[in-house]
Image (tube, helix red, strand yellow):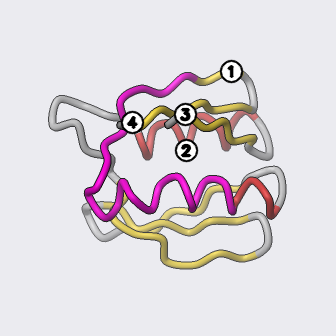
Amino acid sequence: MKVKVICEDKYECQKLSSLISVKDSKETYITKILNIIENEVIVELKDKSAHSVLLKDKYQVEVFVDFIQSVLEKEHKIISIYVSEQDIEMVKG
C-alpha cells in the first residue's frame, strides 16, 4: 500500500521522514501515536522520547495515522520512503 502525506513545510517533512526512516532492522523508530491536536501528531519513539510533527491539515493527519497504525501493530513494515519538498510518499508491505 502506498500513501502520500503533505506536511506543513519542508522542515516538518524532513523530520517525519527521519522518524519513520527504515534502517537495517526494517522497523520505524515510532512506537506509538501519543496524541493528535488539529494538524499535529505527537509520536513516541523507541527511546521513549516524544516528538511532534505538523501536517498540512486534519485530513493529512487521518491519512498518516491510518497508514502507520498497521506498521505500529507490526502487521506491516515500511518498505520505502520518498521525500519531495512538503510531500512524503510511503510504501508498506
Q: Mark 4: few, some, or many residues within 10 Å (few <14, many ≥20)?
A: some
Foreground: disc 4 or disc 3: 3
Which circle marks residue 2 in the picture? 3
Range of residues picked out in magenta = 62-82
Q: Mark 2 or mark 4, which has the lower sequence index?
A: 2
**Mark 4–mark 1 contact, CB under 8 Å?**
no
Left-right relation of 88 to 17:
right
Q: Amino acid at mark 2?
A: Leu
Nearer to the camera, 19 or 80:
80
Q: Mark 1: few, some, or many residues within 10 Å (few <14, many ≥20)?
A: few
Which circle marks residue 16 in the picture? 2
Q: Tell me if residue 30 comes above or below residue 7 in the rendering.
A: below
Which circle marks residue 60 in the picture? none
Tell me which residue sits at (69%, 62%) in the image: 62
Q: What is the x, y in percent for residue 69?
A: 45, 62
Tell me which residue sits at (59%, 34%) in the image: 14
Secondary structure category for the residue under label 2: helix
Q: Amino acid at mark 3?
A: Lys
- Which residue does the numbered mark 1 point to in the structure image? 84
Per the model, the C-alpha gap separating discs 2 and 1 is 12 Å
Q: Tell me if residue 11 comes above or below residue 52 in the rendering.
A: above
Q: Mark 4 or mark 1, which has the lower sequence index?
A: 4
Q: What is the x, y in percent for residue 75?
A: 28, 55
Question: In this view, which residue lies farthest toward the right?
Answer: 57
Per the model, the C-alpha gap separating discs 4 and 1 is 15 Å
Tell me which residue sits at (35%, 37%) in the image: 93
Q: Mark 2 or mark 1, which has the lower sequence index?
A: 2
Q: Amino acid at mark 4?
A: Ser
- Which residue does the numbered mark 4 point to in the structure image? 21
Secondary structure category for the residue under label 4: loop
